[in-house]
Image: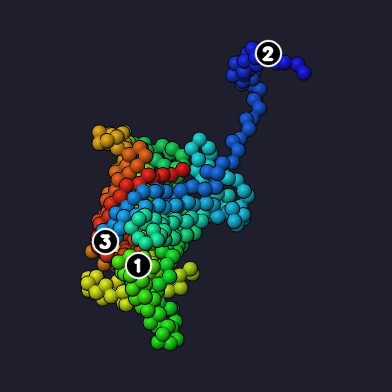
Amino acid sequence: MKRVCPLFVAAALAGAPIAFAQQQANGIEPEATTPDPPSWKDVVRTYEPLYVGYTFDEGDQAYLDFSLSVITPSSILFPWESWNPSNKFPVEGRDYDTPKLFPYQPRLYLAFSGRAGQYMGTRESSPVVGKRFNPLLSARWWQKRRDLTSSAEQGYSLHDYFELSYGHESNGQRIGDLEDPQTPEEAALGRTRFEALQAEYLLVDGDASIARDELSRGWDYLGARWSSSWQLDTGKVFLMFDGRYYLKDGLLQNGAEEYNLWEEDRDWLAEYDGEIRRNKVDGLRASVRYQSKSLDWFFDANEIMLELRTGYKDPFQRITARLELGFKYTSLWYRYGYNSDLVDYYRKDSSWGVAIKIRSF
């Protein structure tokens, strides 16, 4: 077998760009390069930020807080369109083809967001408690990003889109009322199970309020979201408006699971005029995030975010504010208002925490 001289290989590689230029000058079309192979990023992306951190909720023990949120094209399961991974998500440096059926065809996606808390050393069994499970079907129109200082189109971005969705949000727990009780025992089943759990946690952990973690909450909703971003001289701005209409009955949640009267949270029940509903504290959301090196004077911070929520029933009467300061690898945040989790969505309190966060991939 003949040996290849390394100097010959190096000379051939060095001369490749020159040969390419000579071919173009002589009118010869160079051979097409091999396209990039499909990547896992072509079929899965983040829907909401992923994080793991430590959370301190008012009235609760501190816990390890972690969340997973991904979105994937539904055409993977329902291939009515030819399979072309590079057209499923905008990717910087690649062309993103417009849909083929008609000019304003949305892309269809399946998304899932989940959150759980790991209580370490504060409870008898140090359990993992499910706090949020949120699958949804999304119809998304990707928007071309525009610079505020220019009308020139800058290509598609993962941060710029309009979306309509049908979703289900629940905490995956089990204590609640039967939908159609037939006997007095069935009608009182939720109360009976809750009181039994309170007695158990009081005996084992010395805290009956832990039983609230097993109260079942659940809603189906119709959603709409608009997200956009701009490049400024000093950094980047990300803006999002998100609306949800919570359904009394849905395809995945046959009867919304709200606050139960037997929970006997009488002080808060009076605050809501005898009717506690999710749509009084949630449904309208807005957030603005500013990302810039000009923030690095404060311990090398690189972004700041403000998120606001309120209900569409009695809007702005009950507002939740969340302020977050991001660093290279971590973020610090503080929340005041409602929606600390799905069980205590109607209670007004405060939370703060630290997290390692991945906003997008």
Q: In the rendering, which numbered label is found on residue 167?
A: none
- For the residue pair 222 and 102, the one nearer the viewer reads as 222
Q: For the point 39% across and 76% down, which residue is it?
A: 193
Q: Quadrant of residue 236?
A: top left
Which residue is disc 2 drawn over? 5
Question: Hey, what amino acid is under mark 1?
Answer: Val
Question: Hey, what amino acid is under mark 3?
Answer: Gly
- Of labels 3 and 2, the one closer to you: 3
Q: Quadrant of residue 213?
A: bottom left
Q: For the point 52% across and 51% down, which residue is it?
A: 72
- Of labels 1 and 2, the one closer to you: 1
Q: Secondary structure at mark 3?
A: loop
How far across and down, in percent of the image, does residue 99 sit? 55, 49
How far across and down, in percent of the image, does residue 184 sit? 40, 87
Q: For the point 40% across and 74% down, which residue is it?
A: 176
Sequence order check, earlier mark of 1 and 2: 2
- For the residue pair 6 and 145, the one nearer the viewer reads as 6
Vertical order, 6 against 73 (above or below): above
Which residue is disc 3 drawn over? 59
